Image (tube, grey):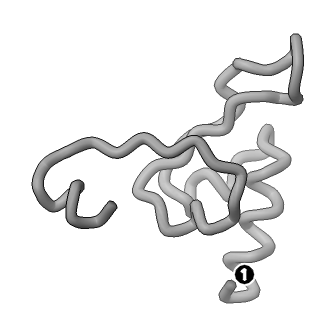
Amino acid sequence: MHQLVEEGDTVLVVEQHLGTKCADWVIDLGPCGGESSGHNVAEGSPEEFANSPTSITGKLLKTLLALGR
């Protein structure tokens, strides 16, 4: 994927994996699954995203970033 970005391409990955902390930009669509989903709960760089008070995933990412994982 890094090669695609270096060549100027945009890469969109739909993933529920904490490896997203390496992403340039993270978007949390939620707040839950089903009919409640699809709303932009939070977005930003992994660091900005981790500090979002509205994202459950962001709170978990903040903990992992603090642990150096």
Residue 33, how many percent across, how many down? 87, 27
Residue 35, how many percent across, how many down? 87, 11
Determine the residue located farthest toward the top in the rendered image: 35
Left or right of residue 17, residue 56 in this image: right
Give the position of the C terminus as an image quadrant.
bottom right
Q: Quadrant of residue 24?
A: bottom left
Could you tell me which secondary element the residue under label 1 belongs to? helix
Residue 59, how many percent across, how many down? 81, 57
Identity, as a three-letter code, of the amino acid under mark 1: Ala
Residue, disc 1: 66
Give the position of the N terminus as an image quadrant.
bottom left
Determine the residue located farthest toward the left in the rendered image: 7
Residue at 88% across, 18% down: 34
Residue at 42% across, 41% down: 12
Position of residue 9 relative to residue 45, above or below, is: above
Left or right of residue 7, residue 68 in this image: right
